[in-house]
Each structure stands twice: as C-alpha cells, then as structure tokens.
Amino acid sequence: MNIDKDGIKAIIPHREPFLLIDEIVELEPGKRVVAIKRVSEDEYYFKGHFPGKPVMPGVLQVESLAQAGAVCVLSLPEHKGKIAYFGAIDRVKFRGMVEPGDELRLEVELESVRSRGGKGRAEAFKEGKLVCSCELTFMFG
C-alpha cells in the first residue's frame, strides 16, 4: 500500500510548508501506520537551524510522527474530517541527528482510540537506527 501526498492531504488537514510526511507505506486504520519523510535541503527551517550545520529540529521530528499518527486515526470512518490535536507528549528521546538528505521511517502504533482522543507510541528511524521516540496523546477537535 502506498498513499502519496495528495492522499495524505485527503485525510489530514496539514499543508505545506507544515505537511511533514511524504508517503504512507503501511496502514492499519486505528492501529498502526508507517510513513516516510524525505528530508530535503530545501526545508524552510534549515536556513536558521543551524546555518552551516543544518539539523531537523526535534520538535518537528515529533510533529512528523504525530502527523503519521493522525493519518492512522483519521482513516477510521468515525473520525473522518476531524482534527487530532496534541494532548500530551511524553517520554521523548532523541538519539541521533536528522540532516538534509536523510529519509525518516516513521512508525506509530496506537494503544487506545476513543471517541474524544487516544494514545500511541511513536518511533522515527534513519537508516534502520532509532533517532526519536515518544508517547503521543491526542484529542479530537
């Protein structure tokens, strides 16, 4: 299964320059998702983070994971058209730098989904190595 950017935009409300996932490669609605983020040299945040040593901000790595999770939960018919907002971000750990040219594999597994929100575990990998992990709690708006 592959869902491209247009397909992603049909599920979540994020748009450029803040759409931070490029492709969905695996999806079990309401349960699990695997997405890809190709980190290009042209990302808007590299101009200031950091000049001469561009690094993807950790908060944007977490946001990429959250957007992947949003695709997973908003793919359920009962949540179609909703917006998933952060409720909490817990146990965040960064274990490596993400730089231009890197490809992130974003994996999110939802632990619970209810009518008002839910919770999941998220991990980002670069070349098979874990670079970011966290627990995400979300609520629907």
Image (cartoon, rainbow, N blue to C red):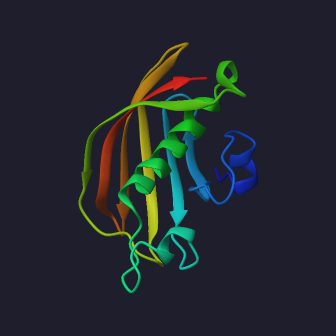
The percent position of residue 129, horizontal first and vertical second, equals 29, 64
The percent position of residue 6, horizontal first and vertical second, equals 76, 53
Task: Please give left or right for residue 81 compared with residue 64 in the image.
Answer: right
Q: Is residue 136 above or below residue 44?
A: above
Task: Please give left or right for residue 41 compared with residue 90 in the image.
Answer: right
Q: Measuring 57% from the left and 70% from the top, which residue is drawn there? A: 44
Q: Is residue 110 above or below residue 127?
A: above
Q: Is residue 115 above or below residue 127?
A: above
Q: Is residue 66 above or below residue 130?
A: above
Looking at the image, the residue that sits furthest to the top is: 115
Q: Measuring 51% from the left and 70% from the top, which residue is drawn there? A: 39
Q: Foreground: 17 or 25?
A: 17
Q: Measuring 64% from the left and 50% from the top, which residue is drawn there? A: 1
Task: Please give left or right for residue 16 compared with residue 136 in the image.
Answer: right
The percent position of residue 109, horizontal first and vertical second, equals 41, 36
Q: Foreground: 79 or 47?
A: 47
The percent position of residue 136, horizontal first and vertical second, equals 38, 34
| Quadrant for the C terminus in the image | top right
Q: Measuring 69% from the left and 52% from the top, which residue is drawn there? A: 15
Callout count: 0
